[in-house]
Image (tube, grey):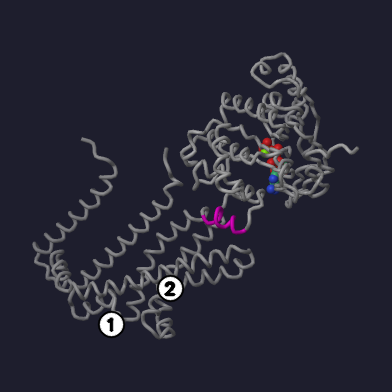
Amino acid sequence: MTVSPRAIAVAAPIAVGVLVLLAWQAACRLWHIPPYLMPAPTDIGASLAANGPALLHALRSTLAVTMAALAISVAGGVLSAFLLVQSRLIETSLMPYVIIMQVTPIVAIAPLIIILVKATMPALVVCATLIAIFPIISNTLQGLRSVDPGLESFFRMHKASRLQMLLRLRIPSALPMFMAGLRISSGLALVGAVVAEFVAGTGGSSAGLAYEILQSGFQMDIPRMFAALALITVAGLVLYGATAALQRLVLRRWQAQG
Amino acid sequence: MLAPAPTIHLQSVEKVFPNGVRGLAPLDLAVGQGELVSLIGPSGCGKSTLLKLIANLHQPSGGAVRWWGEDFSAIGREGRRLSFVFQDPTLMPWSNVATNVRLPLDLDGVPRAQAEARIMPALRQVGLEHAAKRYPAQLSGGMRMRVSIARALVTRPDLLLMDEPFGALDEFTRNRLDEDMARLCARDGLTTIFVTHSLYEAAFLSSRVIVMAADPGRIHAEYVIDPGMPRDEAFRMSDAFARICRDLTALLSEVSPRRAGEEGL
Ligand SMILES: Nc1ncnc2c1ncn2[C@@H]1O[C@H](COP(=O)(O)OP(=O)(O)OP(=O)(O)O)[C@@H](O)[C@H]1O
Ligand SMILES: [Mg+2]
């Protein structure tokens, strides 16, 4: 019997995951490891069920920050790239600051942002955006510059307007690079949201998964900590899968096979 | 009465690139209505540079280019259309063949319905009517080049500039396309300037062959071929064709960068 490579690509990682979970479960039970040291997968599952409403509320909070940051990154990043590509002078004057923004660790500036931006939610979004926007800017910029010079000559020879150049040449040329940037950015937005929540340590109605993790730590409720962690991981995977699917959908013509 | 202005007139046109490379020494060239002129010469002798000057993709460092006796702003009007076929197909990978072919019409503001109606005839001219819905990534290199030629023909150009369009094609396809080109140019009185590496192609197609030399790029010789001879399979087999090829071989050996006595492979 032959198995398609696609089926293997799905089945193999799942098999690994199941095996690891089984081994983990067996190890915890066999050696009687207490849940406050290392909870078994079933303990985590139980905690997930027991704290379901609170954890889901936290997840919704974290995802709201993530999605807002991603949306702002896309809009702001694309706009910045279009601005930077307008002239060499603009790019050389502004690019160092874009890079400074990128290389400054977000945990180091997050406290400052949280003080400066009074409202919690916007402060978290600003932090996450600062992390997520860079791949969008740099990839879109590179994409806008990757226009086939021959094709550009063709457009110029036909006296294409700036708008025609933009819509029919620059944007489609930049799309593959932009999509790759979006894929990186979506992951970073989630990382940024969680990091910002950690630094802010906000509870209350806008408490996110990071707050759940912190609280669980204080209360030594380790299974709950793992449950929150599992939710973050699943959210990251779903985001990655969604942007990868979007990328495939948008770019299917580029890679179209006969 | 004044004679009509030549389609293309280069007056002491010179090209020095910003990095100081002298692409073309000052040269004069006039191409009349309905001529099919090929440019032939060793690599780096400035054939592409000359063609780009004529397409206004390069600005001359000295001298002037005139199109139908006017400057470039006249280009694009009725009876003043120019098409360029590049060395590479330069297609939009995100658009299918039909949309790629329609591009120049869209850019020129031809109404959509009118433009659509012109796609299939253009594709038929290059034998690709079956591939209209395919994407460039799904085509062979030769097919992509033919799409590029269809894109040039769809505007019904008055002047066609081609830079080694068939260089990447196999001999059969190339000969077939050469015959199609010859028929098309004769039928429509299309003025064509054609860069090629193949002296056989130049001999088959041209009413005039310009032999160029390098360092700096310049015109070495011109060779006129009786335009009255029908360009078909019989012409390819004729003694006249063999004689033309012999003459061109002799001219090319004069400009060959590696003459007897210099190092070889
Ligand atoms: N943009 C450029 N900047 C600097 N030098 C250039 C540029 N384009 C061409 N050249 C130089 O000008 C000379 C003529 O180049 P050109 O491309 O016109 O040659 P060609 O005859 O078309 O050669 P080939 O047969 O290989 O296509 C070469 O020496 C080349 O290096
Ligand atoms: Mg060339």
The CA span between labels 2 and 1 is 24 Å
Q: The residue marked by circle 1 belongs to what chain? A: A
User: In what quadrant does ligand 1 lie?
Assistant: top right
Look at the image and give the residue range highlighted in magenta: A162-171
Is ligand 1 less than 8 Å from the beta carbon at label 2? Answer: no
Q: Is residue B165 left or right of residue B252?
A: left
Q: Is residue A163 magenta?
A: yes
Q: Tag 2: Cα neighbours inside 10 Å, few (<14), some, or many (≥20)?
A: few
- Residue A108 lies in what quarter of the image? bottom left
Vertical arrangement, residue A156 with respect to residue B129, above or below:
below
Q: Main secondary structure of the magenta part?
A: helix
Vertical arrangement, residue A103 with respect to residue A171, above or below:
below
**Residue at the spot of label 2:** A105
Q: Residue furthest top?
A: B239
Please, what is the three-letter code of the amino acid marked with disc 1?
A: Gly
Q: Which is nearer the eye, B187 or B26?
A: B187
**Residue at the spot of label 1:** A203
| Secondary element at tag 1 | loop
Q: The residue marked by circle 2 belongs to what chain? A: A
Please, what is the three-letter code of the amino acid marked with disc 2?
A: Pro
* Quadrant containing the N terminus of chain B in the rendered view: top right
Q: Nearer the viewer, mark 2 or mark 1?
A: 1
Q: Is residue B93 left or right of residue B239?
A: left
Q: Is residue A66 left or right of residue A23?
A: right
Q: Tell me what residue is drawn at x 8 percent, y 62 percent.
A: A30
| Secondary element at tag 2 | loop
Q: Tell me what residue is drawn at x 73 percent, y 29 percent.
A: B258
